[in-house]
Image: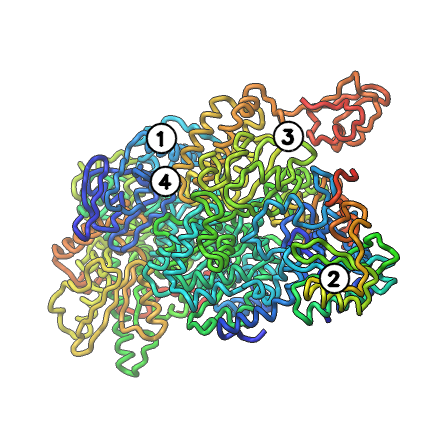
Amino acid sequence: MNGNTVGLTIDRKTMSVPPGTTILEAASAAGIRIPTLCHMKLEDLEYENNPGACRICVVEVEGRRNLAPACKTECTEGMVVHTHTPRVMNARRTVMELILSNHPAECLTCSKNGYCDLQKVAHDLGIREIRYRGEESVFVPDRSPAIVRDMNKCIMCRRCETACNTIQTVGALTAVNRGFRAVVATAFGRDMAGSTCSYCGQCVSVCPTGALSGRSHTDEVLKALADPEKIVIAQTAPAVRTALGRDFGYEAGTLVTGKMVSALRELGFDYVFDTDFAADLTIMEEGTEFLNRLRAEDADGERAKLPLMTSCCPGWVSFVEQHYPELLPRLSTARSPQQMFGSVAKRYFARLLGVERRRLVVVSVMPCLAKKYECSRLEFAVDGNPDVDVSIYTRELARLIRYANIDFRALPDGEFDRPFGESTGAGVIFGTTGGVIEAAMRTAYELYTGRPLPEIEFVRLRGMEGIRSATVDFDGKPVRIGIAHGLGNARRLVEEVLAGKSPYDAIEVMACPGGCIGGGGQPFHRGNMEVLRCRADALYREDAGKPLRKSHENPCVQELYREVLEEPCGPKAHEWLHTRYFDRKNGGTEDSGPEK
Amino acid sequence: MTIGWQVLVCGGTGCRASQSERIEKALKEEIRRCGLEDEAQVIRTGCFGFCEKGPVVKVIPDNTFYVQVRPEDAEEIVSEHLLKGCRVRRLLYVDPETHLRVSDSKHIGFYRKQLRIALRNCGFIDPENIGEYIARDGYAALGKALTGMTPEEVIGEIERSGLRGRGGGGFPTGLKWKITRQAPGERKYVVCNADEGDPGAFMDRSILEGDPHSVLEAMAINGYCTGASKGLIYIRAEYPLAVERLKTAIGQAREAGLLGDDILGSGFSFDVEIRYGAGAFVCGEETALIRSMEGQRGEAMVKPPFPSERGYAGCPTNVNNVETYANIPVILLKGADWFAGIGTERSKGTKVFALAGKINNVGLIEVPMGTTLREVIFGIGGGIKNGKKFKAVQTGGPSGGCLTEKHLDIPIDYDNLLAAGSMMGSGGMIVMDEDDCMVSMAKFYLDFTVEESCGKCAPCRVGNKRLHELLQKITGGKGTEEDLERLRNLALVIRDTALCGLGQTSPNPVLSTLDNFRDEYLAHVREQRCYAHQCRDLTQYFISPEICRGCTLCARACPVNAISGERKHPHAIDPLLCVRCGSCLEKCKFGAVRVR
Amino acid sequence: MERIATVEELRQRRESYRERLELRERSNDPERVVRIRVGLDDCGIAAGARETARYFRREVERRGLEALVVPVGCMGFCDREPTVEVILPGREPVVFGSVGLPEAERILEDYLGHGTLPETVLCLPRRFFFPGAPEGPGDDDSGREGGEG
Amino acid sequence: MEKEIRNESLPSCVREKVHDICREHGCDPGELIHILHALQRTFGYLPEAVQEAVAAELDIPVARVYGVVTFYSYFTMVPKGKYPVSVCLGTACYVRGAEAVLDEFRRQLEIGVGETTLDGLFSLDCLRCVGACGLAPVVSVGDRVYGRLTPEKVRGILSDYYRAAED
């Protein structure tokens, strides 16, 4: 060992590693795989979930009385480790049998079939018999609008508790009870809807088993597709196309836009549109609202409504409603692209087709679970008929495609239908953290100064750091922008706003780390930031390849304003494209709450 | 006013439960009535240790030891003994072997072989009067350390004394203090572990109730050595009296300047706070205790890092047990060599044991390390109750094992007990006789562990549950020999893989009963018989027709009227109704009721 | 209890409290101190044994003697009450008869002071007492072999 | 998808009491267990509303408070009986027949462990060793501790309390 490295031997391979390295890290660096269940390393969020609770990764360390958890035991000088001795294998198999003895053996009908860590490790260990049978826990499954909790499948790995408390600081999930009845649950065993959960779905994206899964609406979609009376419209979010391929063997970040559109047509969708169109619409509304607030500040120096905070992420909106209701006026009143699209489709497109709104079924394909909750909010329905009928997430679309036996890789590249298939580069980058504010600035700058933005790509706003900021010069007036992804980081910016010390004029918040490309409905990235970077780069590539790159240049958007909406933030726009929020912290419900 | 008499009344929890407070009041009234108030004093002391014979009253100056005193006896004690100097014979202790009444406690077998260091002041001083503690060299050790010794010298003294942790682990105390001292960090903590979760162990309680200042002084010395200025006592909620005595002691120590700032002019400041447990045996484990003190769920953490490096609030924390602390002042005053002269080669000093179970003298004893089990159980404990035959003694509580006839002559110390398949534990010693079934004893301990496991790691949360279920199967008469093998493998794996001390030692009761009483397990499995008649499902009560006179006494006594038959005719027990409570056996004068 | 500022003060405070515990310390192992055992049964009290005992206690404290005054039961020598047995450490017990206050003073002065038997006080030979006289007051059985059931 | 009303209207005196007790402990989340002890001593139990009030005062998620309350056996969300009966099931008491005493209490009160009688007079719990092993088997009713119990004595003890409850 020379000064600052530690020499050790694992399975007769000698190596030297920096101090503080765990046996698991040292072994994997040397190509030795050790199975883990509760361990989860989120490199870029500098967080590691290794409570040492599952004990699957135990290894034999010479001179130690009992077996050592590889995920938590740091290497020491001269340590000799054996990872697959008979004693270790007997221990691992017995521990796995114990976990399986309190786990429902219904893999074939489980939503996580094929993607479950427990299934994989049990398979690798070759478990054929569970020798220790006995009482099994019986928890009532909890079906909230977006997330389904079946705690009989919980193996107490504490990943969701870490995600919900340490990364997202929402604090809806925690371990309760003690001993055999210990499980992760919400306060007082209430269902998710009764807790402070904001449906960001990060718990679902880290859960190794089927305990936490997205709510499935495939049946509703299939019913609508089969109904000849209904006209079924699809709108696909920008982040979906960067990840859908993953479930069909494509590399992370491969754009499969064309094949996705063809698959939707194969499934029987009458019209396949692009949510990016509504993203451009959102920029028009939100950009104008931002400029109005800026001009209000110029006029009378009144900063009550600044910084403006984006409202396209329902998880973030729900978080503000639950934890910081006093900041609701700072939220942009613009609806999210999903809801704007639904509203325009059911009001304008229905009229174009000359049909009644009830005959239209709008299905949104989102990278996110919270969108299921958003489209179910009462204020987004007109006399009982929701603007967006169903929202399905990326993995759910992949299931539908497999369900219909479509050979995804062999599909030709299809095109979005017009007019709502048309979108600009600004709409596309909505899917990644920093994308919304960059799109907004491209338009706001031009509307404010009358001149186009010199360098269109805000490299300074891009990247994966938790909190980022930048200043754009609007003809001498510095506009300061703040960006946060992950609700834990958002909370830090919000605390500044609350204390009146926030340096920003506009803040973009995405509830999920990485933004929508890391959403709760996306194919699992297990905290591997490399996957998220590839998806973000894919969006930026598609943006660069687009002829039109600023939202206000979108012809269909311009036509919509000419035909119907007249001007952004006008009376018509307010009715169709804006909304209001409710204080959920002090017992507010759907219908009561502060006026916008 | 020269005091001629002092009447010491035991104020321990046990005796107070038998109204020792009313005895005090009655004695004081009686003394006032006889006009002796200026000659005789009534003083409440801590526990004498002889709980079986409580409430205990000791009259000074003739050292008369009264046992099982009732409030009504006060009148006779004063009028006969104080007024006429004539002892009340019926209240004297009767030595079980010689059947002689012994008055001076020094001649009572229970006390003769004891060497009381940790319990030196218990039953001697009034715990709520700091003066009496000071009168017996109280705080002199602290004074000596603060003004005459450097921290290193004090630690050296403790190391040379060979003192090891009395909480159960037996980790060398001096070494622990040195590690905490050397651990970097300007804020450090000293913790006294008074959780004492072991059922059947109450030595910490007696020390805290009888001599709280010795713990406070030792904690201050510990603070001086390790560089901590704050001490925390984590005490379980089930000890209200100990908490009360501690609060009084802390108040008096602060008042006397022996706690707080600039103690004895040395510039060293140290204060102590009480932290409550809330009913969790696992919080006896260091890391779980620390999390509990931080207001969290008491879940153990993987070690290292050890609390000495990173513990309470992330600072170096030195955790020691109550009894360990009680030894410290004496070691400093009488010197390490004196202490090292007591005990065995690798276990120095004395150990306090709580004798309980089927033994004549239930109570608290303190014997030098190296005393044999035989001396403790038969010499001091007065042998087995009701003349029954000794079967086993369980040491170390739920983490310990049971020792049998062949272990009676091994000298008690940490290593010998470990070698014999048990462990020292906190000192709980449960004696069992021929009527105790070892399989159901193991089941009792597993039932305890399953209830008290924190549920964080799979081997303990699920493993101990399965062990308990296997034992239920065996005591229910449905066990197979293969179950015995599974019991052993599962127990060994749990011991090998559990995260903390509780889980790693919870299989010990099973493993040691399997080793020492294999025949009993086989009887339960092969013949479905429990020779100790404790496993209800394997016990059959029946009436032998030849002996039964039909006196119907048993029929009337049976709570579930499972016994039928007319007067003067042989009766019969319906095995399906019988709940095996044994009332019929007790009531039958002719021995007609039999157990099989 | 006011503040103890130095180690010296602590030592002084210990001395002042010692007295309160002295009775208990001595009674714990009486062999190392002088034991003055005053017969305090009915006839003894009638003959003024209580005052004798009080006198001894006060004097022992006043003079700071390493002694323990122990009230005991009847020693069997009824017409010489109050009877007082004095045991100097390591010496044979000596029993004095009809010990009033003046005799008590003499015992303290001569016997405890110089170890010489005071002439004016009646000194009763040991053998008058039944063999194996009980160690302490009343008739506990520690001295007697066998004993009641 | 109605969000259930949380923080249902808590009587103001209760809210103030929670506020005072939290303030006494400096609103420090590290003191959560002390605060819960104080609240249980005040109200006798810890209903959901009280836990929510504590969470709001200490600015921590209410789920964490619930996680702590359900972990420690001392805290209860169900009101205890006027005379809480706790049977010690430590080893010393178990070996001297505590189980039979517990069964007798179950039979007499017709409730299971952890339950409270309908008239609210008695609740039955098990304790892990109160440290009076000399008097095994031990049962405590409120603060009073009864030692050396046998199933036969159970009826007598209960009748004392029934009589006390009448007058």
On what subunit does the disc labeled 3 rest?
Answer: B
Q: Residues within 10 Å of mark 4 (few under 14, many from 20)?
A: many
- Report the residue marked by disc 2: C117
Q: Check contact, mark 2 vs mark 4: CB within 8 A.
A: no
- The amino acid type of the residue labelled 1 equals Asn
- Report the residue marked by disc 3: B389
On what subunit does the disc labeled 1 rest?
Answer: A
Front disc: 1 or 2: 2
Front disc: 2 or 4: 2
Co-location on one chain, circles 3 and 4: no
Left or right: C6, with D11 as reference point: left
Co-location on one chain, circles 2 and 4: no
Q: Residue at x 59, y 73 (%)?
A: C1
Q: Residues within 10 Å of mark 3 (few under 14, many from 20)?
A: some
**Picture quarter with the C terminus of chain B:** top right
- Report the residue marked by disc 4: A55
Q: Which mark is residue A90?
A: 1
Left or right: B509, with A397 as reference point: right
Gap in angstroms between the C-alphas marked 3 and 4: 44 Å
- In the figure, D56 relative to A176: above or below? below
Left or right: B435, with B396 as reference point: right
Q: Residue at x 29, y 62 (%)?
A: A509
Judged from the image, the secondary structure of the residue bearing numbered disc 2 is loop
| A3 vs A372, nearest the viewer | A3
Gap in angstroms between the C-alphas marked 4 and 1: 12 Å
- The amino acid type of the residue labelled 4 equals Arg
